[in-house]
């Protein structure tokens, strides 16, 4: 397996993502998933990838089977630079869950919004680290309840 630069898929049609693994359509709209990716992300094994389209790829969510330690921040920072956007959850603003199903796959997708407070990497339970670069945003989420982690790559609008 090789590391992959996920933002290189932005602005391409979904078939370009076939380099990541077998693409499955999650719903009739614009969501696709890859359940056994054949690439790595920052030298880490990925459990699943969700791809969102607006005609072309503009958003990827990578889910990891376990939490990677905070040193992973330094690996990403070596590539994308450091960030001051190290956050913890403050107050719940919104929560909604939707179940998506097709012949091979069933998933419950939750959307939750919290207000955030800035912290440092020294804080015990960091929830989110955000990098805003020229054309992309990278959000690293730590899910302490399920001992999981995800990375969200999104294209920034000009």
Image: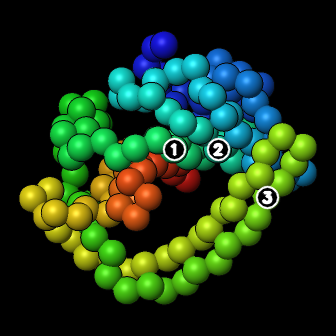
| Residue designated by label 1 | 63
The Cα atoms of the two marked residues, 1 and 2, are separated by 8 Å
Across and down, in percent, residue 83 comes to 22, 51
Any part of residue 19 in sight: yes
Q: Nearer the viewer, residue 24 or 53?
A: 24
Residue depicted at 49% across the width and 76% down the height: 113
| Residue designated by label 3 | 100
Q: Residues within 10 Å of mark 1 (few under 14, many from 20)?
A: many
Furthest-front residue in this view? 146
Across and down, in percent, residue 101 comes to 83, 54
Q: Nearer the viewer, mark 1 or mark 2?
A: 1
Residue depicted at 71% across the width and 55% down the height: 107
Across and down, in percent, residue 74 comes to 19, 38
Residue depicted at 66% across the width and 42% down the height: 51
Q: Quadrant of residue 11?
A: top right
Q: Nearer the viewer, residue 107 or 18?
A: 107
The Cα atoms of the two marked residues, 3 and 1, are separated by 17 Å
Q: Regarding mark 1 in the picture, which secondary structure is present there? A: strand
Q: Nearer the viewer, mark 2 or mark 3?
A: 3
Q: Residues within 10 Å of mark 2 (few under 14, many from 20)?
A: some
Furthest-top residue in this view? 1
State whether residue 82 is above or below residue 123.
above
Q: Residues within 10 Å of mark 3 (few under 14, many from 20)?
A: few
| Residue designated by label 2 | 50
Q: Which mark sits nearer the N-terminus, 1 or 2?
A: 2
Residue depicted at 63% across the width and 28% down the height: 36
Residue 92 located left or right of residue 142: right
Q: Are marks 2 and 3 in contact (CB under 8 Å)?
A: no
Q: Which mark sits nearer the N-terminus, 3 or 1?
A: 1
State whether residue 119 is above or below residue 91.
above
């Amino acid at each position: 397996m090789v590391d992959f630069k996920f933002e290189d898929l932005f602005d391409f049609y979904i078939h370009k993502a076939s380099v990541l693994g077998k693409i499955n359509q999650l719903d009739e709209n614009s969501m696709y998933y890859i359940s056994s990716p054949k690439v790595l992300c920052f030298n880490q094994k990925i459990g699943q990838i969700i791809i969102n389209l607006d005609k072309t790829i503009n958003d990827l969510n990578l889910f990891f089977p376990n939490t990677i330690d905070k040193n992973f921040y330094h690996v990403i920072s070596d590539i994308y630079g450091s960030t001051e956007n190290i956050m913890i959850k403050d107050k719940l603003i919104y929560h909604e869950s939707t179940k998506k199903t097709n012949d091979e796959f069933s998933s419950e997708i939750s959307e939750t919004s919290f207000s955030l407070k800035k912290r440092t990497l020294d804080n015990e339970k960091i929830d989110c680290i955000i990098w805003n670069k020229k054309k992309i945003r990278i959000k690293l989420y730590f899910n302490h309840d399920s001992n999981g982690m995800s990375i969200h790559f999104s294209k920034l609008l000009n």
